[in-house]
Amino acid sequence: MPVFLTEHTIAQANQVADDLRVALVRVLEEPTLEGQRAADLSRHLGVGRMTCQRINQLRRGGPEDANLLATLPGVSGLREFLSAVEQAGAPHASLTAAHAAVDAFEQFLLNAELSQSQLSQAMTLHFEATDPSRQLARRTELYEAAAAVTGQSMDTTVSIMAVRFSEQANMNFEQIAIRGYSQIRASLSAMPIRLPMNAAFSEFRKAGGEEAAREPQELIEQFCTRPLPRIDRRVIKEANLAHIINPEHIPAGESFDCFASQHSRWNIRGTGEHRAIWLYVDYPTRHCTFDLYLDQRLAAHSIVTADCHLWGTALLAPPEDLWMTRFADQMTFTELGTGTHNAGSTSYLRHQELTEHLFESHGWNPESYVGYRCQMEMPIWRSGVCIVLQPRTEIE
């Protein structure tokens, strides 16, 4: 059964490793040992060459954290080494700190109820879970597996939205949005590729039905691959409208881009304290960028935060229950400032141009909006990225 280390245990291991490093480097600086290679130390001390190699690595630095405890010899090997150094003429007093560090290492293993090999395995699990580079490697494996299973993949998933108060008497919010994908690949897949606009939730329920007046989606031809894909409209269960990308004119297996825009108005009453907009990671994708631009009046009265959760019915749960589905430290959330000056993205090189098109095509002035961005490399397939708006008066 795998052992998971706590942050407190890791902090203790780091301290033990640091003490061992300092003490053993001083031992290696003894006049009779200084400058000797591992083979020379082995012959000089009568200690196994592997033991000497693992200790002599400290001359070159070695791991900077608790991982050092996995690369050094065990407690018995360290004591054998120190005993041989003393027998070779080193004063016992010069080895006091090293003996104390080895004793502390032994006590640490006893307290943790682990052998050195078990500690090594547990640290591997810990750093795979907490090191961002290792997290990215795991998410990359998930992306590759999901793409192989579904026969679908995207290089970039893009969602850009702008929201303002509506001037119509029977509506309170107005929204323009762009949703699409770059470098779509579909091979031997029977599943359709949908183009859903982000889902809005108010007070833990999905907003829709009579609350929304959506105009049809329009293909943004200048950002789509030619020959152009097509957007089909299909009614599901006589209630829900789905927009499907139809790549019938795209040569099979070739990648293509598809982006569409939509203008909507909302009549959401009793919005309460909790409003959220969710971007679902429908398909395996290498990059995901979700931008939300709020009218300055909305931005001034809102505390804007972001999160990433497992996609499921729990998305409708109150915030105090969402901790059960939350993925920690998987994405970056930034404020883009006023206007579209910071809209560019390395994930999709035309992101700045696409954002400017959103505002220009509808005659909205981008300088009246404040932008926020959620961005993730190798987002977790079937997760949901959300931007949460809470009234500022409820926070302050």
Image (cartoon, helix red, strand yellow):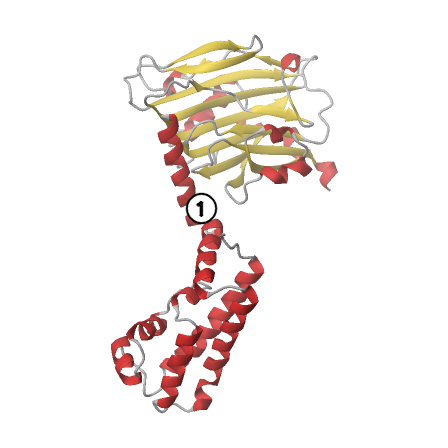
Is 197 situated above or below 100? Answer: above
Q: In which quarter of the view is residue 67 placed?
A: bottom left
Q: In which quarter of the view is residue 136 placed?
A: top left
Placement of the C terminus among the 4 image quadrants: top right
Question: Can residue 344 be seen in the rendering of this structure?
Answer: no
Which residue is depicted at the point 68% across and 33% down? Answer: 318
Q: In which quarter of the view is residue 260 placed?
A: top left
Q: Is residue 236 left or right of residue 210?
A: left
Q: In this view, does 290 lie to the left or right of 189?
A: right
Q: How crowded is mark 1: few (under 14 residues within 10 Å), some or many (20 or more)?
A: some
Is 106 situated above or below 177? Answer: below
Which of the two residues, 348 or 38, is positioned nearer the viewer here?
38
Whole-percent x and y of residue 41? 29, 80
Whole-percent x and y of residue 114? 50, 63
Q: How many labels does the image show?
A: 1
Which of the two residues, 189 or 357, is positioned nearer the viewer here?
189
Whole-percent x and y of residue 286? 40, 35
The residue pinned by badge 1 equals 135
Which of the two residues, 82 or 232, is positioned nearer the viewer here?
82
Which residue is depicted at the point 41% across and 19% down? Answer: 191
Question: Can residue 393 be seen in the rendering of this structure?
Answer: yes
Q: Is residue 80 left or right of residue 104?
A: left
Question: Could you tell me the amino acid type at mark 1?
Answer: Gln
Whole-percent x and y of residue 342? 48, 36
Is 28 situated above or below 162? Answer: below
